[in-house]
Image: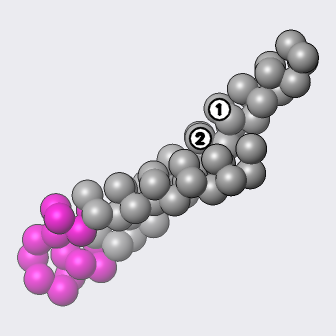
Amino acid sequence: ATLTRSLVSGFTIGILSCRAGFRTSRGTAGVGEAANNAVVGSMLAVFLEEVVMVQIVTLLRGAL
């Protein structure tokens, strides 16, 4: 379960960071804004993923 959570979190952070980087504009100011957006978006996404995964694991453990 821990390995799966790490892989999903890493994949999400990578995808969101690449998306923010590719959408960068306005030179160096845009890079700082894109980095900030990537960090905030990644933190929110990982938090939501953890909530969902905990619920799934709880349901599976209750079913066994």
Label number found at residue 19: none
| Alpha-carbon span between mark 2 and mark 1 | 5 Å
Q: Residue at x 80, y 19 (%)?
A: 59
Q: Is residue 51 above or below residue 37?
A: above
Q: Is residue 58 above or below residue 50?
A: above
* Quadrant of the drawing holding the C terminus: top right
Residue 33 percent across, percent down from the top left? 29, 72
Q: Is residue 62 above or below residue 57?
A: above
Q: Judge whether residue 44 is colored magenta.
A: no
How many numbered circles does the render carry? 2
Q: Is residue 32 left or right of residue 54?
A: left
Q: Residue furthest bottom?
A: 28
Q: Residue at x 24, y 78 (%)?
A: 31
Disc 2 vs disc 1: Cβ atoms closer than 8 Å? yes
| Residue located beneath label 1 in the image | 52
Q: Residue at x 11, y 71 (%)?
A: 25
Residue 62 percent across, percent down from the top left? 90, 17
| Residue located beneath label 2 in the image | 49
Task: Inspect the image, locate mark 2, and give the three-letter code of the amino acid beneath it.
Answer: Glu
Residue 26 percent across, percent down from the top left? 9, 76
- Rate crowding at label 2 as few (under 14), some (14 to 19) or many (20 or more) other CA atoms within 10 Å: some
- Rate crowding at label 1 as few (under 14), some (14 to 19) or many (20 or more) other CA atoms within 10 Å: few
State the image quarter where residue 23 is shown.
bottom left
State the image quarter where residue 6 is shown.
bottom right
- Give the magenta part as a residue range: 20-33
Task: Inspect the image, locate mark 1, and give the three-letter code of the amino acid beneath it.
Answer: Val
Residue 19 percent across, percent down from the top left? 26, 58
* Quadrant of the drawing holding the N terminus: top right
Q: Judge whether residue 23 is colored magenta.
A: yes
